[in-house]
Amino acid sequence: MRLMDTLFEQTVTGLNKAMDLTWRRGKVLASNVANAETPKYRASELDFGKELEKAFGSNGGQQVLRTHASHMELTQESSARMKADLTGTTRADGNNVDIDLQMAALANNGSDYTNAVQLMKHKFSLYRASIRDGRG
């Protein structure tokens, strides 16, 4: 068990993993935007749901956070489950990147990351307040 999992509850660990996945998804979306004019380029998407399933297991129908490093290796690019993004229409040059859809996805992804950061900041402020109150 990692030190962070020992010190903090599962919420903090889960938020940390969500921020890592959102960052990784941002890289994929940015790559799609950068290749919007590349012939035969096919848009990709991080399978966010599958990656969360790797991080969260089930125990009698109840969600349990898996904290062993092998359950979710975010340090290796190859560990992310990629899938084809078929939202755009394929053009004559074989490219299917819809720049408007990709930019909207990038904006939503940025909001998701910001929300996770705000939740993490709130959680740590609660910890800080608890420590101060404990000194009494």
Image (spheres, rainbow, N blue to C red):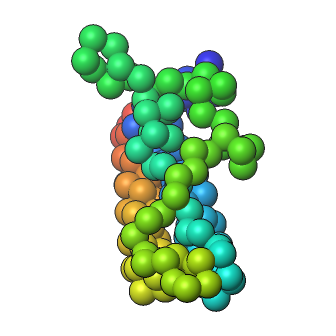
**Quarter of the image with the C terminus in it:** top left
Residue at figure coordinates x 27%, y 11% from the top left: 60
Residue at figure coordinates x 48%, y 63% from the top left: 85
Nearest the viewer among 85 and 9 is 85
Q: Is residue 125 left or right of residue 96?
A: left
The quadrant in which residue 79 appears is: top right
38 relative to 117, above or below: below
Nearest the viewer among 41 and 115 is 41
**Which residue is at the far top?**
60
Residue at figure coordinates x 41%, y 23% from the top left: 57
The x, y position of residue 16, in whole percent, is 52, 46
The x, y position of residue 37, in whole percent, is 64, 88
The quadrant in which residue 100 appears is: bottom left
Q: How many numbered callouts?
A: 0
Q: Is residue 43 left or right of residue 107?
A: right
The x, y position of residue 119, in whole percent, is 38, 55
Nearest the viewer among 14 and 42 is 42
**Which residue is at the far left?**
61
69 relative to 21, above or below: above
Residue at figure coordinates x 44%, y 65% from the top left: 86
The x, y position of residue 132, in whole percent, is 43, 44
**Quarter of the image with the N terminus in it:** top right
The quadrant in which residue 73 appears is: top right
Nearest the viewer among 33 and 52 is 33
Would residue 59 be visible to someone looking at this image?
Answer: yes
